[in-house]
Amino acid sequence: MERNRGFSLIELMVVVVIIGILAAIVYPNYSDYVLRGKLSEPRAKLAEVRTRLEQYYQDQRTYLGACAAGTVAPLPNDAQYFTYSCPTLLADSYVVRADGVTAQGTGGFRFEIDQANTRSTPTVPSGWTSSASCWVRDKGGSC
């Protein structure tokens, strides 16, 4: 009598369950890792815009007129995950803002920097901790 070689249905189901458990653990961690990578864009771009705004101020003695195309301090136009704006632009102060693009998975995030180099993350998605004194890097609000 010849024995059948192969896997039983129960053995196959055990393997499927193990793979499902591993996927349930790994996927959220991977998603958080990808999101934290996307959050590096506004930190770099806002720091660059701040440097250019200070250069503009040195040349013009005012921030008025900055953040425009054709100046030394234009807003980034090559951004992928955030949109950039200058909601406050006065003669002696400014705020540059980066708002997350929902379609890119960064919706709900808002990063800001001002003329005093005060960095803040006033708005974050549910489950994250905001900060008035730094740009958050992870859900716990660490800087």
Image (tube, rainbow, N blue to C red):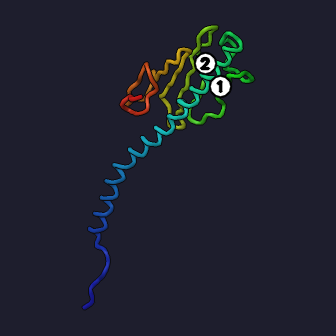
Comparing 9 with 86, the one in front is 86
Comparing 5 with 67, the one in front is 67
Above/below status of 19 relative to 138: below
Considering the numbered disc 1 on the image, is that residue within a helix, a strand or a loop? Answer: loop
Q: Residue furthest front?
A: 58
Q: Which percent across, then down, holds residue 23?
A: 36, 52
Quadrant where the image shows the N terminus: bottom left
Disc 1 and disc 2 in contact, CB within 8 angstroms: yes
Above/below status of 83 relative to 104: above
Q: Residue furthest right?
A: 70
Quadrant in the picture for residue 142? top left
Quadrant in the picture for residue 85? top right
Q: Amino acid at mark 2?
A: Cys
The residue shown at (32%, 77%) is 6
Considering the numbered disc 2 on the image, is that residue within a helix, a strand or a loop? Answer: strand
Above/below status of 29 relative to 143: below
Q: Which percent across, then down, holds residue 63?
A: 65, 13
Comparing 39 with 25, the one in front is 39
Quadrant in the picture for residue 47? top right
Q: Amino acid at mark 1?
A: Leu
Q: Which residue is mark 1?
A: 75
Q: Which percent across, then down, holds residue 50?
A: 59, 22
Is 128 left or right of 69, judged from the image as shown? left
Number of labels in the image equals 2
Q: Which residue is mark 2?
A: 86
Quadrant where the image shows the C terminus: top left
The residue shown at (67%, 14%) is 58
The residue shown at (61%, 8%) is 92
Could you tell me how far apart the alpha carbons at marks 1 and 2 are, in whole angstroms?
A: 8 Å
